[in-house]
Image (cartoon, rainbow, N blue to C red):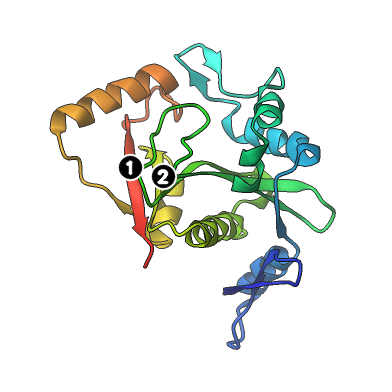
Amino acid sequence: MSLSRTRSGRLHAVGSDEAPSTQEMSREDAVNNFSLHPLTLESIEGMTRVHNEGFGGKVCCLCCPVADTDGSIRRYYQQHPERLPMCALAVDKHGTPLGYVQLAIHPMNDKDGLHTTKPGETYVEAISVAAAARGMGIGKLLLQWAEDKSREQKSTLLTLTVLNGNPARRLYERFGFEAKPPTDPCEECIGSCVVCCIMGRPYGLCDPHCGAVDMQKTLV
């Protein structure tokens, strides 16, 4: 599967010449019904629904919900409209929002102040796909938009941070992301403790994983 742009600049998935299997056809048909749009103030409500579905079960500092329950996302973008083009929203043919990706492109930093970008870096600060769209290639479509946007802004490195135990890491690896080796074991240990204190154990108290890993993809 490859990606092509319509005249409006939206990304769509198109199939190869090889005849796909029934399962592949089902996925291809589904993805062809999706398109990507830059975030607008009018579409923030839809993005918030996807955000709350993906992050609603997680908590910050072990007690504060990550879900937006007070309109904080809308207020942020009203105060920082320059960030709207850095976010893409995936919608189906009916306009239902099913995923989004938010970027921080140097010299911008992520909106929560947890990551400082370096020259030439684009950081994927958030990416989420609604449950109804998982397994349909929307995550890959969002990552491709992120890479295209990074190249458009002359970035040479695409980065993200993923919590250990998050199955989305397999998608990132298939897309070309590689884990950055820790430069200091002490920093890695401290980072794991910080993530645990901030996010708790998002995949359950019995999950053996803890901490997070930084990943990167070199753009050449």
Q: Amino acid at mark 2?
A: Leu
The C terminus, quarter of image: bottom left
- Label 2 belongs to which residue? 160
Q: Amino acid at mark 1?
A: Asp
Q: Is residue 165 above or below residue 158?
A: above
Left or right placement of residue 60 versus residue 193 in this view? right
Q: Is residue 110 above or below residue 14?
A: above
Toward which corner of the image does residue 187 lie, by quadrant? top left
Residue displayed at 57% across by 58% down: 145
Toward which corner of the image does residue 43 lie, by quadrant? top right
> Residue 6: where, in percent of width, then height?
73, 72
Residue displayed at 57% across by 30% down: 55
Q: Which class describes the residues within 10 Å of circle 1: few (<14), some (14-19), or many (20+)?
A: some
Residue displayed at 51% across by 20% down: 59
* Tag 2 near tag 1, CB within 8 Å: yes
C-alpha separation, residue under disc 2 versus residue under disc 1:
6 Å
Residue 214 is tagged as: 1
Residue displayed at 48% across by 34% down: 110
> In this view of the protein, which residue sits in the foreground, 103 or 21?
103
